[in-house]
Image (cartoon, rainbow, N blue to C red):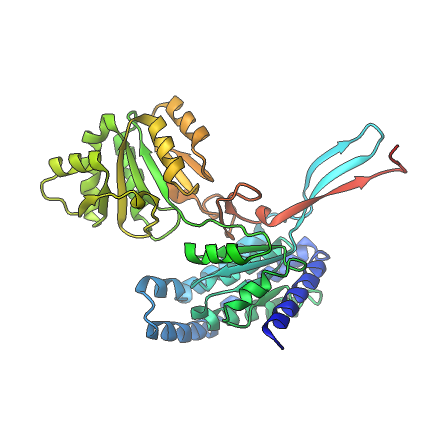
Amino acid sequence: MTLSEQMTQLARQAKTASRDLARLTTADKNRCLLVMAEALDKNGAAIQEANARDLDAAAKTGLSGAMLDRLRLDAKRVAGMAKGLREVAALPDPVGRVLEERTRPNGLKLRKVSTPIGVVVIIYESRPNVTADAASLCFKSGNATILRGGKEATHSNRVIAETMVAAARAQLAAFPEHAIQLVPTPDREAIRELLALAQYVDLCMPRGGEGLIRAVAECSKVPVIKHYKGVCHVFVDADADLEMAEAIVMNAKCQRPAVCNAMETLLVDRRIAAAFLPKIALRLGEKRVQLRADPAAETILKSEIKNPKSEIRPATEQDFYTEYNDYVLNVGVVDGVGAAIEHINHYGSAHSDSIVTRNEAHANRFLAEVDSAAVYWNASTRFTDGGEFGMGAEIGISTDKIGARGPMGLEELTSYKWLGLGSGQVRT
């Protein structure tokens, strides 16, 4: 069988499974999710054994320590996957919700009802727990899913998926055999072949670095939900509570700098820059955050801090477009909220941005004019997350404007259709 034939078979099987999934009740889906969770708990040793094989192979290829940590599945992380499935089971079923109803003058009743999308392809790197998260969310929302994890997690992903499918099939005879499938080959060309099958595949969601996401978006013939990178900002307004601002800045940058909702650029109003920047720079220095400052910020920092714990260097134009995912931070001084908004809309990635201020008018202008998926007033950008938004597990984050935007949970994995309920009406 050629690669093209193999991917076509995979996609056809998924399309058939998606139609079979539509027949399952909410109770059916929840029972399956709960037995899947129980199976992950019981099969934890086998999952960790498979993961150890992946870790050993990845270490030999020179994978970085941070990436190895993302790949690792210890007992706590396996338990976390099972817990995530139970949380998804406890969430309301997103399918079959009546979104809108209206009755026309001729008596025709129209009802807008949420439906599954169909077949969802999810492409991701390193983290094998995504296999359980993505499969559970797609299953609960009635979608068949085709999963393509990174080659570094091959053994882990296979055991997780097989464990979930076997448990569900044993629990429910009507569970579609191909509701959850893995792409069986590491060949990169398989993705191009699969995403050309628009007659079977309805949506693709890549999760990973900017290079992966751009490659997928450029080759796909099916819709792709994506965010290329997270260049997130915190703006400290002249009317900010500076103690609050310090706490928010430290959290946004230093709690987990390698994630997409971590701050990459700090903007400070010129009227308070001399008072705020030296204090926050010293605190960032305790975390060894390298500062890349614009001329105004650099002048303040180098004149006020005699023995900085952090390196301070001039920022380049390109730096302000850069997602570092590291202990590196751009610092800029701006003339008020309007200049901050202009900077963010120019250099940002439409992911997550925050203003710290006691001035409600400034805050409302920022919330209205910053063109990002999540915009905050007096809060850290780190809250842009499905779990933090109360969605349960998260399938991804979108910075697109058509369809889903921001953290994506169960509701974002549905579409809708119109039902027309008549009593013999004909159009004249």
**How many numbered marks appear?**
0
- The residue under the point 45% across, 47% down is 385
Given the current orientation, which residue lies at the most extreme right position? 424
- Asked if 218 appears above or below 150 in the picture, the reply is above
Relative horizontal placement of residue 250, taking residue 27 as reference (left or right): left
Relative horizontal placement of residue 353, taking residue 31 as reference (left or right): left
- The residue under the point 80% across, 30% down is 104
Residue 303 percent across, percent down from the top left: 11, 35
- Asked if 121 appears above or below 188 in the picture, the reply is above
Residue 357 percent across, percent down from the top left: 33, 28
- The residue under the point 52% across, 48% down is 408
Residue 292 percent across, percent down from the top left: 23, 44
Relative horizontal placement of residue 91, taking residue 423 as reference (left or right): left
- Residue 108 visible? The answer is yes
- The residue under the point 60% across, 61% down is 196
Q: Quadrant of the C terminus?
A: top right
Front residue of this view, candidates 218 and 265: 218
Residue 358 percent across, percent down from the top left: 34, 25
Corner quadrant of residue 50: bottom left
Q: Quadrant of the N terminus?
A: bottom right
- Asked if 115 appears above or below 299 in the picture, the reply is below
- Residue 36 visible? The answer is no
Given the current orientation, which residue lies at the most extreme left position? 306
Corner quadrant of residue 369: top left
